[in-house]
Image: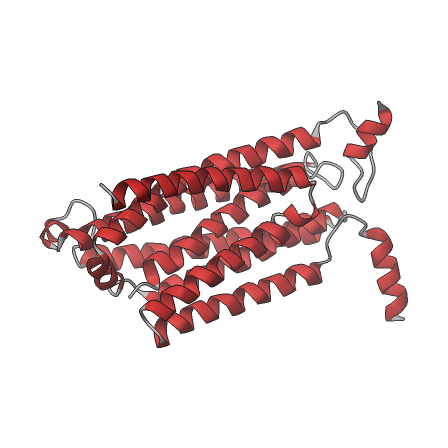
């Protein structure tokens, strides 16, 4: 019976992502948040900051890809997004070079 | 020509209308980039000052209420989920479900602001607020930290308020039928905006609350 429903649902949601996927992404985001918070509480300092610096971009990527649909859009949207990030990266890089070697 | 149009509208409910959905989506993303760069400038200032006053930043961050910051993160992440479920439901022509999720998102956004209000009030009662004498007496780096905290969470808070206003407008448009399963872009873009607000908060959490 569940097979029939699944098949019917699949037929219907050609371009629509299932609610289940979004719930899984949400659970993933909660787990990653818990990891970041736990690391900052139990290993304050370098490890805590390091975990936050690795986990936070992963969380951002999950939101961008699934909630903001970038995974399902045309590639041009991903390229546009990465270009905007590259501009920000240049901005950040040049400022830090200025600040470090002033 | 007609194939092109139907290609653009090839969704769950193919419907030939003369609307440039790809163009409007591109426009929405370009707007989101300007938002990213607006906050990006503040993140940049934060990074440089943190580099210059690392111990002060770590000390000042210890004063923030971690519990409230984390709770607000959970509230916003959940509101992002209900937002995306609302869009999903509307695309499947489940209007009641979509409205219910949108109202839930509005409720969670309100919850976020209420928690933020209590957090800011507590700081205010301790004399920590931009322009107070106390904030001038603090070590320079701590003063910078708190000013950036109010500036960045404040600008983010304004975005939450704007998001709530837009959601309310879309809610009425859904009730009047102007936004529907065949014309869901306005709700979809409201969702994109809302997820960006969530995305920015995700970076604010470790930078302000989890730094000590």
Q: Is residue B169 left or right of residue B8?
A: left
- Which residue lies at the image location 39% right of the left edge and 58% below the top edge? B205
Please name whichever residue, A35 or B79, is drawn nearer the observer in this view of the structure. Answer: A35
Q: Which image quadrant: the C terminus of chain B?
A: bottom left
Please name whichever residue, A62 or B18, is drawn nearer the observer in this view of the structure. Answer: A62
Quarter of the figure with residue B60:
bottom left
Q: Is residue B73 left or right of residue B128?
A: right
Does residue B16 appear in this view? Answer: no
Does residue B176 appear in this view? Answer: yes
- Which residue lies at the image location 70% right of the left edge and 63% below the top edge? A20
Q: Is residue B133 left or right of residue B173?
A: left
- Which residue lies at the image location 49% right of the left edge and 44% below the top edge? B164
Residue B165 screen position, x and y as percent: 49, 40
**In the depicted structure, whether residue A33 falls above or below residue B117:** below
Residue A55 screen position, x and y as percent: 48, 63
Q: Which image quadrant: the N terminus of chain B?
A: top right
| Colour scheme | secondary structure
**In the depicted structure, whether residue B25 falls above or below residue A54:** above
**In the depicted structure, whether residue A30 falls above or below residue B82:** below
């Amino acid at each position: 019976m569940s097979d029939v429903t699944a098949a019917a649902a699949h037929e219907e949601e050609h371009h629509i992502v299932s609610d289940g996927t979004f719930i899984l992404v949400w659970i993933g985001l909660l787990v990653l948040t818990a990891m970041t918070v736990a690391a900052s509480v139990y290993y304050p300092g370098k490890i805590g900051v390091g975990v936050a610096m690795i986990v936070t971009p992963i969380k951002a990527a999950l939101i961008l890809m699934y909630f903001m649909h970038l995974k399902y859009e045309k590639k041009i949207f991903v390229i546009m997004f990465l270009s905007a990030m590259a501009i920000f990266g240049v901005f950040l890089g040049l400022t830090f070079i200025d600040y470090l070697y002033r | 020509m007609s194939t092109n149009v139907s290609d653009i509208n090839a969704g769950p409910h193919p419907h030939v209308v003369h609307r440039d959905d790809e163009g409007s989506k591109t426009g929405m993303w370009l707007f989101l980039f300007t938002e990213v760069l607006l906050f990006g400038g503040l993140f940049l200032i934060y990074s440089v000052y943190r580099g210059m006053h690392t111990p002060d930043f770590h000390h000042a961050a210890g004063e923030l209420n971690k519990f409230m910051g984390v709770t607000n993160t959970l509230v916003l992440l959940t509101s992002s989920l209900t937002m995306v479920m609302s869009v999903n439901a509307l695309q499947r022509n489940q209007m009641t479900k979509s409205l219910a999720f949108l109202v839930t998102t509005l409720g969670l956004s309100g919850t976020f602001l209420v928690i933020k209000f209590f957090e800011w009030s507590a700081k205010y009662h301790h004399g920590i607020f931009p322009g107070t004498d106390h904030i001038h007496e603090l070590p320079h780096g701590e003063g910078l930290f708190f000013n950036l905290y109010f500036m960045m969470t404040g600008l983010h808070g304004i975005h939450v308020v704007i998001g709530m206003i837009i959601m309310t407008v879309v809610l009425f448009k859904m009730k009047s039928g102007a936004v529907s399963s065949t014309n869901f872009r306005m709700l979809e873009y409201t969702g994109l905006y809302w997820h960006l607000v969530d995305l920015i908060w995700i970076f604010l959490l470790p930078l302000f609350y989890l730094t000590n």
